[in-house]
Each structure stands twice: as structure tokens, then as C-alpha cells.
Image: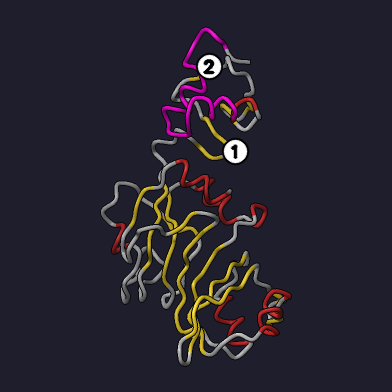
Amino acid sequence: MFNLNEGIRLQKILAQAGVGSRRKCEELIASGRVSVNGKIVDELGARAFFHDIIEVDGVPVLAEDKVVYAFNKPLGVVSAMFDSKQPNLGDYFNLVAQRVFHVGRLDVDSEGLLLLTNDGDLADKISHPRYEISKTYQLEIVGYLSESERKRLLLGIELSDGVTKLDSVKTKAKNPNTSLIEVRIHSGKNRILRRIFDEINHPVKRLIRTHIGHLGLDQLKPGEMKVLSFQEIERIFS
């Protein structure tokens, strides 16, 4: 399939792109997780060129013109690239070299991790239910969850547009009138967490998204952004 006398060894290209050590890249190839120009390559002697479309688990490795940003969206910022009346994402990204768009959204009164990219294929994969990417949130709610309410959240809450359940619920701290909880959910329905907790009479006072998949905010402060490496993008799907 590939001319072994031309190009550069595939594992070397992967290693130079920051995918991992040479040995790890060889393991990726041998396990059939690497494709070149749409075809799976599992031959350790295979060669390719840097201009080829090389992917690991469907994620482009050498898309130099493609970029993914992690952004810590502050409270009060609209998830839109332009808004004439309110602070918006365009206010933060108008000086970046690429023309990016946001993957999903956070409400104006919500904070935390938001991804922006110019890679439509990657955005589709992140958003597609097939990949079942969970999202983790820190919530400050009114009152305290009882054990029966926690179980109800895990079994499912019936709303006007169907039943939605949480993947996990943990109480992190209790204050005089509110509590801090951590929840994980797959659903991306509009304002779903606020609607769920309104339904059980524990309105959300503050909502921060901390993780998309296993990718976290890390040290990003509100209003800060960073370009994600291949390894960080991979964490979204791990």
C-alpha cells in the first residue's frame, strides 16, 4: 500500500508531532489506530509524508491549519462570536490568527470550560452522541441533597422533553443555606442542569463546567485560553 523507500517512517512523524514516544507510536500503529489518507496502517515499516492526512483514532495529527482552544468562559459572557449588546466570545478571540467557532455552549449565567476550533470534523465528533462524551460540573445549589434525591437524579428526572439522568452526583461541601456538588452528565440539552435541579426544588445558584471528557480547566483562569496539544485533544475522547 505504501512505498517503503519513500517518505519518513510513520512512527517518527507521529513522535515529532508530539503523539508520544517512538515506542508508543509503534504500538499505536501495530494496534491499527493510525490511518494515512483515510486508510488504516498497521505496518511498522510504513512511511508517509508530513503533508499526508495522518490520524490517530480519527483525530488529525498534522493539521497545522487546524486549532483547538480551551477557554475558561467568565460569568456574563454570551456563547456567541458576536453580540452587539453583551460581552461575547468574539471579544476574546478577535485577535487570534484563525477564525474559530465554539463547540456547544454555556449559558450567559454559567462559567467554565468551552472549546473553540476551526476544525469542523473534530467539532462534529465532540458533539455527536455516538462518542458519549461526558461533561463534569461544579454546582452551588440551594439546600442539601437527601439520599433519596441523589438516587432520583441517578435514575432520571422527567422533564417536559423527556427523562434525563445524571451519571454521578457527589456532595463536596455544605454551607449554611447552600451546598457544593459535583455532577457528571452526557446530555447536552439546553439548560438541562438548571431545569433538573429546579424540578427537585434545589435551584442552581452557580454553575461551572470543569471537564469535557477527561480534559479539565487545569490552571486556566476566567477569560484565559490556551491551544490544546494532540495529547490534550485525545483526553476529550478517553
Range of the magenta residues? 3-27
Q: Is residue 114 above or below residue 146?
A: above
Q: Residue at x 56, y 53 (%)?
A: 126
x then y, percent, for residue 168: 63, 69
Q: What secondary structure is marked by label 2? A: strand
Asked whether residue 107 is drawn in magenta, I would say no
Q: Residue at x 51, y 30 (%)?
A: 53
Q: Amino acid at mark 2?
A: Arg
Q: Amino acid at mark 1?
A: Asp
Q: Which residue is mark 1?
A: 57
Query: Which image quadrant for residue 51?
Result: top left
Judging depth in this view, the residue of 79 and 41 nearest the camera is 41
Residue 223 placement, left or right of 159: left
Q: Residue at x 67, y 78 (%)?
A: 153
Query: Which image quadrant for residue 199?
Result: bottom right
x then y, percent, for residue 172: 51, 75
Query: Mark 2 or mark 1, which has the lower sequence index?
Result: 2
Q: Which residue is mark 2?
A: 47
Pointers 2 and 1 in contact (C-beta within 8 Å)? no
x then y, percent, for residue 191: 54, 76
In three-dimensional space, the C-alpha distance between marks 2 and 1, rounded to whole angstroms, equals 18 Å
Judging depth in this view, the residue of 179 and 85 nearest the camera is 179
**Disc sitting over residue 115 in the figure:** none
Q: Residues within 10 Å of mark 2 (few under 14, many from 20)?
A: many
Q: What secondary structure is marked by label 1? A: loop
Classify the position of the N terminus by image quarter. top right
Q: Residue at x 40, y 66 (%)?
A: 80
x then y, percent, for residue 160: 68, 82
